[in-house]
Amino acid sequence: MKKLLKVLLTCTFALSMVGCSSTTEEEETSDLEGTILVAAAASLKNAYEDELIPLFESQYENVTVEGTYDSSGKLQTQIEEGLEADVFMSAATTQMDALDEEGLIMSDTIVNLLENKIVLITPTDSTLELSEFTDIVNAESIALGDPESVPAGQYAQEALTNLGIWDEIQDKVSFGTNVTEVLNQVAAASADAGIVYATDAASMPDDVVVVAEAPEDSLSAPVIYPVAVVGTTANEEIAKAFVEFLQSDEAIAIFEEYGFTSNI
């Protein structure tokens, strides 16, 4: 009887320790408290604001995530000039690499998270008979992202240059300050055609039609979206938790709902 009682007491103690350990882990998780600023490419805004940020905040009740969205080039410049961002996610590796080389990114946190596609779009009610990417030459007005600061514009320039038609369309082009501006121009039929990310086109299915994807051989590399913690963050623990969260199966599934492809 004594032996049985000893066994029961031992088991009860062991179970209580497991419970204590679990409680401690939960308390450690809930210890995260504060606000972080995420600087992200404009093409990420819908996924972030509609689902990802609310989901993260529901998991960390004492954390607030604020977002600022623009072209990756503009966000790079803002971070270089002192923007107090905690996390940076760009629509190309160029901007991330530049900040990393300048010591403004925590190198060991960089993750090439997502892949996107570059597509030619027209307004839904367009009467233009476009079927291939190179048919953009038949449009009278064309909206593109500014290659100086907009990754989608840089990809467009590279693809059209490699296809031998970049110079041919210059008289027809108006440059947008980010990819969302380009999308809206085409959706409003202010431009006959434009080049955006596939995810942008998918966000306005009633307003724009995808004519074609940029041919694979017209781009030197896939369209990759990297994410990382900004080196000057004052909220390192929360920022790292957010970057880790973006790599979770749950977050990747949300990105895929918005047309992105996982690159991890």
Image (spheres, grey):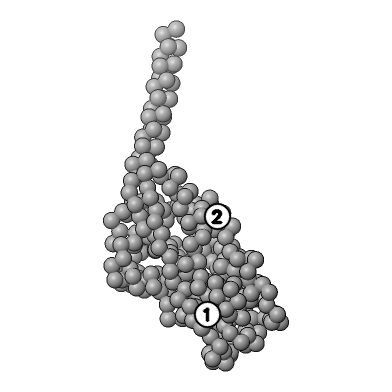
Q: Position of residue 86 (x, y in %)?
A: 34, 59
Which residue position holds label 2?
254
Quadrant into which the N terminus falls? top left
Q: Residues within 10 Å of mark 1 (few under 14, many from 20)?
A: many
Q: Residue 244, position in %: x, y?
A: 43, 53
Q: Amino acid at mark 1?
A: Leu
Residue positioned 33% across, 46% down in the render: 33
Mark 1 or mark 2, which is nearer to you?
1
Residue at 57%, 78% (x, y): give it: 190
Label 1 to label 2: alpha-carbon separation: 27 Å
**Mark 2 crowdedness (10 Å alpha carbons): few <14, some 14-19, many ≥20:** some
Q: Is residue 247 above or below residue 220?
A: above
Q: Is residue 82 left or right of residue 157?
A: left
| Residue topped by disc 1 | 144
Q: Residue 66, which numbered label?
A: none
Residue type at numbered disc 2: Ile
Q: Is label 1 in a helix, a strand or a loop?
A: strand
Furthest residue to the top? 1
Is 115 or 51 nearer to us in this picture? 51
| Residue appearing at x 46%, y 80% in the figure | 146
Helix, strand or loop status at disc 2: helix
From the viewer's perspective, tell me whether residue 85 is left or right of residue 41: left
